[in-house]
């Protein structure tokens, strides 16, 4: 089932949907409530019902067998290139040069990584993982972090926090404010 959930995130990504829209887009595909779609995307939901699998197939034009196969492999997705693109797209404007300097490479090398013309060495991959604060053991070559639903870069995390706070009702905000203040005032 994990392959199916990864495939769903891939189809949403490939379709160009903004990550914030994934739950509502999936809810529309499956004709299900947004919280259930969100749980599926986060890997917390259970199995899709037969009706949901059929709706997903109808929406994407893929057979049940295709949906259960590895779509990234079948589509020839270069996971490393997409991961690097995703990470660098999360940097604020102008920070790509800073990123290259911190890794001790030229900006043109980073551009070649983005285009797939050159691949980072194992040492540079480790430095990239450290630069972005990825969890230990993350494999940029095989793990499609570009499909993660969680924000990764500093700017993505700040944006998520800001958006979430903006959408929170006043009553809840008042309840959580003391804890937020303690967390953020250290």
Image (spheres, rainbow, N blue to C red):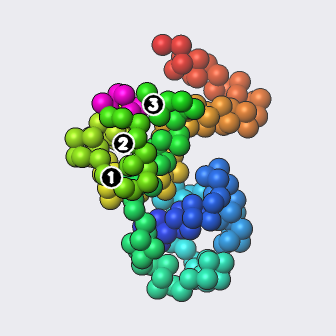
Q: How far apart are marks 1 and 2 (CA)?
A: 8 Å
Tag 2 residue: 109
Residue 100 visible in this rendered orientation of the protein: yes
Check contact, mark 1 vs mark 2: CB within 8 A: yes
Check contact, mark 2 vs mark 3: CB within 8 A: no
Q: What stretch is highlighted in magenta?
A: 99-104
The label number, if any, that marks residue 140 in the structure image: none
Residue at the spot x=52%, y=35% of the render? 91
Q: Classify residue 164 by image quadrant.
A: top right
Tag 3 residue: 97
Callout 3: helix, strand or loop? helix
Q: Nearer the viewer, residue 25 or 121?
A: 121
Callout 2: helix, strand or loop? helix
The label number, if any, that marks residue 118 in the structure image: 1
Q: Earlier in the sequence, mark 2 or mark 3?
A: 3
Residue at the spot x=61%, y=83% of the render? 61
């Amino acid at each position: 089932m994990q392959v199916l959930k990864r495939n769903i995130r891939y189809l949403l990504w490939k379709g160009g949907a903004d990550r914030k829209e994934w739950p509502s887009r999936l809810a529309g595909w499956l004709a299900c409530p947004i919280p259930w779609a969100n749980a599926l995307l986060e890997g917390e939901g259970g199995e899709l019902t037969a009706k949901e699998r059929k709706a997903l197939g109808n929406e994407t034009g893929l057979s049940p067998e295709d949906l259960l196969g590895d779509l990234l492999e079948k589509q020839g997705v270069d996971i490393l290139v997409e991961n690097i693109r995703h990470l660098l797209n999360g940097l604020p404007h102008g920070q790509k040069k800073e990123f290259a300097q911190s890794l001790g490479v030229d900006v043109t090398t980073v551009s070649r990584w983005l285009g797939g013309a050159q691949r980072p060495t194992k040492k540079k991959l480790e430095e990239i993982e450290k630069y972005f604060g990825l969890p230990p053991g993350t494999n940029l070559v095989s793990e499609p972090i570009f499909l993660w639903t969680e924000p990764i870069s500093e700017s993505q995390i700040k944006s998520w926090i800001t958006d979430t706070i903006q959408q929170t009702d006043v009553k809840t905000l008042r309840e959580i404010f003391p804890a937020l203040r303690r967390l953020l005032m250290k």
